[in-house]
Image (cartoon, rainbow, N blue to C red):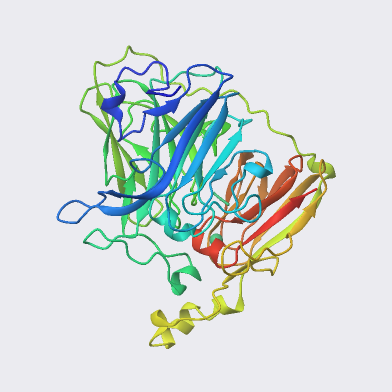
Amino acid sequence: GLRTGLGVGGATLAASALWPRGLAASVSAAAPGDVVAVELVAKQRMQRILPEPAAPSPLVTYAERFPGPVIRLRKGQRLRATLVNGLDEHTSIHWHGIRLPNAEDGVPFLTQPPTKPGERHVYEFTPPDSGSFFFHPHCNTVELLGRGLAGALIVEEEGGPRFDADLVCMVKDWQLNPDGTFGTFTNDRGASRAGTFGTVSTVNGLIEPVIDVPANGDIRARLYNVDSTRVIDLRVEGAEAGGGAWIIAVDGNPLPPRPLDGWPMGPAMRLDVVFRAPKDPGKTLRLTNVYAAQPKPLAQFRAVGTALPNKRFAPRPLPAADLPVPDVKNATVVPMAFSATAVAQLFDDALLATLPFADSLCLSNKTFWAINQKSWPEGGHERLPPPITTLERGRSYVFELANLTPHLHPIHIHGYTFSVLSSDLRKVTPHHADTVLLEPKERLRVAIKADNPGDWMFHCHIIEHQDTGMMGYIRVA
Ligand code: C2O
Ligand code: CU
């Protein structure tokens, strides 16, 4: 059966003290080896994001509150997740970052029939890797993710360092009018450039929340960028020990600990970090986004309870992942060029300045982006194009991701984890990731071993780019 609890050892606080700010509460099964069953009812639920006098906002969520639920599995446990479609459109659940069987990947028309309003769909798989993952729909995503349809899936590693608390921090903006209603999630001008930004920034759906952490404890925070558009670069400021937070995992994949001081996160990217909470109860640390010119405070971590015994702060690595190792030397190189279409170039800044009605321009062709000169056809997944490329099962491949645009693109592959090799623009720390942030004009080399057969989506995770052409799929056969 299911129980709600901290799902993490060593924490000194009751779940109710942490819920929902730090989202320590979770769905977790009693013993490893068994099946964890969850039901996810996707539907509209009212939730307050803006303070009064604004009204609660019509979110769309999988649980009573955004960003719930947090599904926690131990490595080796099997997840059985039942999607109940309480929306008035078809949907599905994509399990972002999980190397799962293709049929469980949750892409309507490509890997499963769409789940119609009122229908149920059961997903079942055993995640092979530990880490911080998440899930979201794969159609009408601009609106549905914009309204909050996402949840966290955490697979706990076996062994490794222990933490005094284990928190989920989902960073997300909302496109809200001052009265609490949603504004428009996309417009052509945004979609053809950096994207349409939200109007209010939150962590776990709260504006600058104060998140309680055990005093003098070692805090593991799973930082998620679940925004549709914004790139963030986070800092934990004010820590006495360690100088701030240390990254211990990227997209769930362990990394030798390194300071959190310049690892920009595009939409869908995650970082697990560890930091030491202040010793004095009531003292706080700040979680800040420094990506923008003006650093933006996002949340505070406040020490509570009796200070835990003194110990040296020394971030330890997580147990190594067991990922397939691509044979880079003998790999086939696949060029992948990300470009803007001629239509998008109509939205060039200089040209826009000459057009008095630029913002109300409405083009019938909403194809602004392409991968290898091919744009995903309009209208969701109904009209499947051929794959971008077909890979031979078992062989290794190096993708040369070339960004031919002046914008950032977080590039995501389903069902696989990239080995990130090198860039022609910057020094890259070799690491594993399911989503990599391509800088303007950058060429980034990533490798995979094509061991997981099926049709796997490959796209930019700025949702408006994904929806206006920068999407395709890779066939492994
Ligand atoms: Cu989280 Cu196809 O994406
Ligand atoms: Cu993009």
When the figure is inspected, residue 155 is found, relative to residue 62, above or below; the finding is above
338 with respect to 217 (left or right): right
Look at 34% across and 13% down and name the residue there.
Answer: 310
Q: Is residue 259 visible?
A: no
When the figure is inspected, residue 66 is found, relative to residue 218, above or below; the finding is below
Spot the residue most to the left.
53
Spot the residue most to the top.
309
Q: Position of residue 139 (x, y in %)?
A: 53, 57
Q: Position of residue 202 (x, y in %)?
A: 32, 48
When the figure is inspected, residue 258 is found, relative to residue 389, above or below; the finding is above
Spot the residue most to the front.
118
Q: Nearer the viewer, residue 281 or 428?
A: 281
Q: Position of residue 388 (x, y in %)?
A: 73, 60
285 with respect to 61 (left or right): left
When the figure is inspected, residue 205 is found, relative to residue 214, above or below; the finding is below
Look at 48% across and 51% down and name the residue there.
Answer: 267
259 with respect to 33 (left or right): left
Q: Nearer the viewer, residue 174 or 193?
A: 174
Numbered marks: total: 0
Q: Is residue 263 visible?
A: yes
Q: Position of residue 448 (x, y in %)?
A: 72, 43
Look at 32% across and 11% down and name the residue there.
Answer: 309
